[in-house]
Image: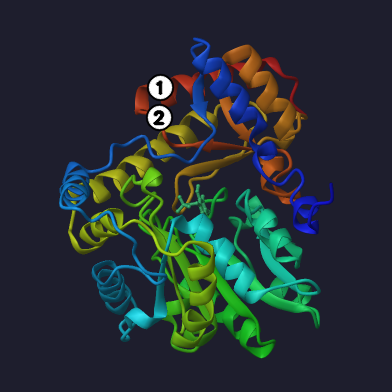
Amino acid sequence: MRFASITQRLQGLGSDKWHVHIEGKRRLAAGEPMLMLSIGEPDFKTPQAIVDVATERLRAGRTRYSNGRGEPEVLKALAAHYTARSGRPITTEQIIFLPGTQTALFACMMALAETGDEVLMPDPFYVSYDGIIAASGASPVTIPVSPENGFHLQAEDVERAITARSRVLLLNTPGNPTGAVISAKSLAEIGEVCRQHDLWILCDEVYSSLVYQGKFASPLDNPDLADRSVVVSSVSKSHAMTGFRCGWAVGSEEFSAQLLPLSETMLFGSQPFLEDATAFALSTDLAETKIMRDTYERRARIVVEHLSQAPGFTCHMPEGGMFIMADIRRTGLSGEAFALQLMEEEKVVAMPGEAFGQAGAGHLRLSLTLEESDLAEACRRIVKFAGRLKTA
Ligand SMILES: Cc1ncc(COP(=O)(O)O)c(C=O)c1O
């Protein structure tokens, strides 16, 4: 039988990239004492107050169809959140509620790019980005960013990568896997290049609540860039609600109007009781969100401190997010070979940097999602393993 070309374009771009993680999980399920540092899933419980609202609304019968844009209560909470953040009125007509950042990225990319177009993004990039671009039919154009420069994207490098086919610049701040936070100044410079070449800026802000150094900045909050910016995010990481699949896209009213039929065609709405819980999460000052941020930062310091003793490792404190991207090039092993041997010999599971693009080669991504004693133990094992290798 014949399949549509999208299936070909996505070959190898789905869960294949997670093969080390999947094998680690299999071993864990089989009873091996694996220490899993391979996925960005918060180890915190969803705050009880949010669970209570979801349960209460479920019991109250908020189980019917929603609409394509989202329930009024959650749209109002999101509009208030982005209005307060940007200092400019953001209306509910600028927002579409979608099941998670992943779906929001997919929907937005389908609305902005297609076959013949090019989508630019810094490399290393989040694992699903090349799949999302491939699904749209567009071609990815990667702009390497280096650990020596804190994985920061430079406006000149964006400018150099632009061609007549460029349509979208895909950003992620704080970055996964890099931990880089894009400053307001840098965004203005990069945005100016996008303005000159009439590019969209699609910005994945799923880690925006987890900034340790510097100040979070968004293209949507820059009045000169707002009309060409689309922000996608969710409560997955900020409130440890990954399984709720509650996210959204925010752009101009024009963008949102164009996206709406796509959301209606694809989903015909999300689950009202989960949207209610998200509205509550967004409009309530919950102590847990700050605790999570502080905990990830503390864990990052622990990992960086430990791994500075690992022969062949160079690793810097991330500016935000949930990950450490360790440069292991001096060990002489690829990220893939290191991760596989580490899993075999020390039962520590980490993501090979190669899963995040060519510029991720020779790196290891470690998630900060274990409690401190386990994280420290995983680091000790990594240091031990690296010590057995002959470093250059
Ligand atoms: C950069 C980035 N974007 C998007 C996602 C998906 O987030 P969500 O759970 O909101 O779909 C993740 C999840 O790890 C991520 O790291």
Tell me which corner region of the image, top left, top right, bottom left or bottom right, holds residue 218.
bottom left
Q: Are marks 1 and 2 in contact (CB under 8 Å)?
A: yes
Q: How many marks?
A: 2
Tell me which corner region of the image, top left, top right, bottom left or bottom right, holds residue 331.
top right
For mark 1, give the secondary structure: helix
Q: Answer with left or right where residue 260 lies relative to residue 338.
A: left
| Depicted 318 relative to depicted 352: above or below | below
Amino acid under label 2?
Leu
Q: Nearer the viewer, residue 301 or 360?
A: 360
Q: Which mark is residue 370?
A: 2
Q: Is residue 172 visible?
A: no
Q: Which mark is residue 374?
A: 1
User: Between marks 1 and 2, how big is the CA–CA gap?
Assistant: 6 Å
How far across and down, in percent of the image, does residue 129 sit? 64, 56
Q: Residue, x 71% and y 47% (percent of image)?
A: 13
| Depicted 318 relative to depicted 91: above or below | above
Tell me which corner region of the image, top left, top right, bottom left or bottom right, holds residue 95.
bottom left
Q: Residue, x 67% and y 44% (percent of image)?
A: 14
How far across and down, in percent of the image, does residue 52 sit? 16, 45
Q: Residue, x 78% and y 71% (percent of image)?
A: 115
Q: Which mark is residue 252?
A: none
How far across and down, in percent of the image, does residue 363 sit? 67, 39
